[in-house]
Image: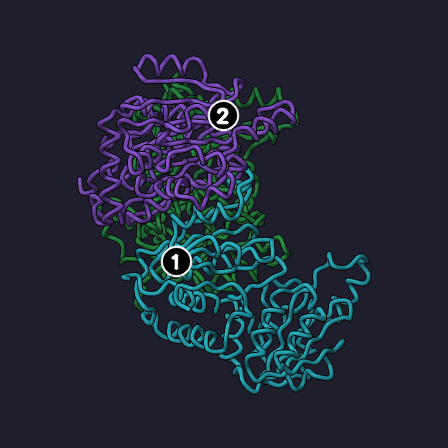
Chain colours: A green, B purple, C cyan
Amino acid sequence: MRHGNILTSKQLSRADIEAVLDHAAAIESDGSAAVEDRSETVLGLLFFEPSTRTKMSFETAIKRLGGDVVDMGSVDASSVKKGESLADTVRVIEGYADGIVLRHPRQGAAKLASEYVDVPVINAGDGAGHHPTQTLLDLYTIRENAGLDDLTIGIMGDLKYGRTVHSLAYALSNFDTRQHFVSPESLQLPREVVFDLHQEGASVKEHESLDPILPELDVLYVTRIQRERFPDENEYQKVAGEYCITTETLEAASDELSVMHPLPRVDEIAPGVDTTDHATYFEQAHNGVPVRMALLDLLLGDSDE
Amino acid sequence: MRHGNILTSKQLSRADIEAVLDHAAAIESDGSAAVEDRSETVLGLLFFEPSTRTKMSFETAIKRLGGDVVDMGSVDASSVKKGESLADTVRVIEGYADGIVLRHPRQGAAKLASEYVDVPVINAGDGAGHHPTQTLLDLYTIRENAGLDDLTIGIMGDLKYGRTVHSLAYALSNFDTRQHFVSPESLQLPREVVFDLHQEGASVKEHESLDPILPELDVLYVTRIQRERFPDENEYQKVAGEYCITTETLEAASDELSVMHPLPRVDEIAPGVDTTDHATYFEQAHNGVPVRMALLDLLLGDSDE
Amino acid sequence: MRHGNILTSKQLSRADIEAVLDHAAAIESDGSAAVEDRSETVLGLLFFEPSTRTKMSFETAIKRLGGDVVDMGSVDASSVKKGESLADTVRVIEGYADGIVLRHPRQGAAKLASEYVDVPVINAGDGAGHHPTQTLLDLYTIRENAGLDDLTIGIMGDLKYGRTVHSLAYALSNFDTRQHFVSPESLQLPREVVFDLHQEGASVKEHESLDPILPELDVLYVTRIQRERFPDENEYQKVAGEYCITTETLEAASDELSVMHPLPRVDEIAPGVDTTDHATYFEQAHNGVPVRMALLDLLLGDSDE
C-alpha cells in the first residue's frame, strides 16, 4: 500500500484492510506505534464539497502524527472558480504537499487526480462514488465491537443514494458476514450493487421492515434518509417515522447489539439511545482519527528515503 | 480551574481571575513559564459566528504553547447545515480535540456543550450571553495599566446590547472599583444588570454625558454603537457624534487615563487618539495572546496524567 | 532586507533579487540551509481577496521552515465586515504574528499596512499594483532554466491588466534581457509601463503576433486573457484562439524554450504542451515554496535577537 493511493473501497483487499486496522489498533493503544514522526510532512486538503468530520479527522490525524496541513479552503475562494481544471490544481498542490486528500462532487475525481501526480491521493468522497476511509473506520468499529467474521449486520435507511453504504457492503464481502438491507422500496440498494455483492459471494438479504431480523443482529448500521429525496412531505414523514430507532425499538435487540451511524444524524436515532450501551456512533466517529493516522502512516512510508 | 470549563464571567471568582492574570504576566515576561510544552495538544475551534480577533488569538495562543488547532470552518461548510444538533457536533469533536473553544449565536450554548463532553469547553461568546476570555484580557489590561483595586472606570457606548460590557462589569465587582456607565438613555444598561451589580455590592453610577466624570477616571472603556440599533439614521448620527472620543475630549482627562476598546472600532475613537499615551486598545487586543495562553495552560493541566 | 518589507517589485535591486534566489537555491538543494528553525514563528495571513496558490505556498513555506500560520479567514467572516480599517486590522494582527502576508484589492494597501506595524509586511498582491513574490519565483524559474543574463523573453497575453507581467518586466530590467511583448492591440502594455521600462534602459519591443520572434526566445511567458475584458464574445473567442499555445505552435521554437505561466490557465496553453520539455509552469508554481522559504527566512532574521 506504501506510496499507493486510496481510491475506492473495492480496491481494498482483506489483507489491506487488516493491515490498516491492525496498525490503527496499535496506534490507539500506543501513540508511538506510528512508523515515525511526521514533523516534515505537509498534507494537502482539497475539499471541493463541504465536510466537517472527514476533514477535521484527517487534520487531527496528521497533526497527531506530528505533521501539518495546507488547506485549499473553499472553492469560492480558489483558482477553481477561475476555471482551472482538477488536473492542473492537483499538479500545483503536488509541489506543496507530500500527499493529497481529495473530496470532490464528481465520481472518479480521485482516480483522475491520481493519474496526474506522484504523491499519494486519498479519496475522501467523490460524489456518488466511494468514500473508502469512512469504510475503514466503519470496519474498525465493527471489528472492535462485534468482530468481522461470523457477523450479522443490518444496514438501514437510504440505501439507494448512500455511498457510505455501498462502500461498506463491498468491503464486508471480504469477510464472513450476513448482510441484511432494510429500507422502503423506493430507497432500496441499486440493482447493480446487489448484483456485484452476489458476484462476490456475499450473503445479502433485503427487507422493508427491521422487526423480523433485529433480534439476530450484532450490528445495526443506520443512515440518514434525506428529506429532499421525497417529492411529498407526508411520505417523507411516514418513512422517517418508520425507520427511526428508539429505546423501544431496541427492546427486541440483543444486549450486545452495536448501533452505528456515519453521522450527522437528524431524526433517525432518538437521543434516548445515546445513553444506552448500544450507542456506538460517537465511538465510530472518534475512530476516524486512529484509522486515518494508520492509513497516512502506511501510505506516506518512511520519510528518510 | 484545571480540567474545568470557562463558561461565564460570573463563574470567575477573584482567586480564579488572579490565577489567570498572574500566569499570563509570568508567560508574557518569560515564554517558558507555561506549565509544559503542548506539542501533543490539539484544540478544537467551533465558531458558529464570525470572529477575527478572538479566533486568531486563541489560535496564536495554542500555537505559541506548542500545540495546534482543528477548525470546524464556517457553518455553511459544515454538517451543522445538514441539521446536526450542537450536542452531537461537540460529542464528535471531543474525539478529535483536547479542548473546545465555542462561539455560538445562542445564549447558553457553551454551558449546554459542556454538559455533553468531558474535555474543557471555553465560551468564546454565546449570543447576548457571556464572553469571559474577553473579560479576562480586559482585566489584565486594566491591571497592567491602572491596577484593579481603587480603580475608577468609565464604561461608555452601547451598554444595552454589549455582552462585553456586562461581563466586564460583573467581573469588576470582585474588586474595589467605582464603575461609571455613560450612554444615551436608549442604550442604558439593562435594569437586571444594574440590579445584579448592586446585589454584588458594586459601586455603580449612570450618566448620559462623559464630561462630569472624565477628569477622575483611571480607565475609559469605549464600545461601539451599532447603526442598526437606531430606526432613524439622523438619531444615530447625533448619538455617534456625541459619544466619540477625540484628542480634544481627552484634554480634560488625567494624563494617566487609559482608553480601552474591545475593537473593532468604527468612529467611536478618532484616529488622532492612537498616537497619544492614552491609547491602550491595541495593547489590549495583543493581551489576548498571553491571557489565552495562561488560561489554556491552566485548563488543559498536565498532559502526562 | 532583514526586518524590512516586501512591497513592490520596483523596490527589489539586483542584489536583493540575487540574495533571495541564491538562498532559495541553497534551501532547495539542502533544506537545512535555512538560517534557523522557525518553530517559534507565527505568520499572519491576511487575504482580502481569494487566492489558492499564493496562500498555500506561503503556508507551506513557513511550515517547512518549522513555523506556523494564523489565518484571518475570509473577509465575510471577519471584523472587516463590521467596518474596521486596514490600519486597525494590521495593528491588531501585529500582536499575534511575527510577520504579515497581505493580499488586498486596493493598490498601495501593503505599503499603507507597513506604515502602521513594526513586523515585516509582504505584499501578496494589491489590486492592479504589485505582486513581488510572484516576480521572485518567476525570476528563480527563469534563472534555473535559461539564466537571467543574455536572456530573450517573450511575454504574451493580457499585458494591460496583468500585474504579474508589469512586476516581472520591471524586475527583468535589472538584468541583461531583451523583452518582447506580444498581445492584441487592445491589451497592450500601458504606455506608462513602457515609458518606465525605457527609462530603466530595458530593451523592449511590442508585437501583435508571436510568429516572428518565437524562434529566438529562451523563455515564453504566457498569461491568461480574461473573457470579461471583452464586450463581445466573438472578439474574445478570436483573440483567445490566436494567442493559444499548442504543440504545433512550438514546432517553430528552440528546443530549449521554456514555456511559463503564472496559473491558473484556462485555454491559453493546450494540455498537449504539458508533456513536452517546454512545459515549465508546474515547476514554476512549485518554486513558490523554496523562494518564499528563502524570503521569509531572510526577512524574519535571527529569532534569537
Visible in this render: residue C155?
yes
To which chain does the residue with label 2 belong?
A: B
For the view shown, which residue lies furthest in the front direction? B252
**Residue depicted at x 58% and y 48%:** A76
**Residue depicted at x 29% and y 44%:** B41
Visible in this render: residue A219?
no
Between C90 and B50, the one nearer to me in the picture = C90
**Residue A52 location (% of width, % of height):** 46, 40
Q: Is residue A219 above or below residue A134?
A: above
Badge 1 local density, few (<14 within 10 Å), some, or many (20+)?
many
Q: Is residue A84 above or below residue B128?
A: below
**Residue kind at label 1, given as amino acid type:** Val
Image quarter (top left, top right, bottom left or bottom right) of the C terminus of chain B: top left
| Left or right of residue B156: residue A68 | left
- Element at label 1: strand
Q: Is residue C261 above or below residue A7?
A: below
Q: Find the distance from the CA under tag 2 to the CA under tag 1.
A: 46 Å
Image quarter (top left, top right, bottom left or bottom right) of the N terminus of chain B: top left
**Residue kind at label 2, given as amino acid type:** Asp
Residue A42: mark in rendering: 1
- Element at label 2: loop
**Residue depicted at x 61% and y 29%:** B237
Between B33 and B213, the one nearer to me in the picture = B213
**Residue C31 location (% of width, % of height):** 34, 70
Badge 2 local density, few (<14 within 10 Å), some, or many (20+)?
many
| Left or right of residue B252: residue B8 | left
| Left or right of residue A128: residue C192 | right
Residue wearing tag 2: B158
**Residue B42 location (% of width, % of height):** 32, 44
Q: Is residue B32 above or below residue B18?
A: below
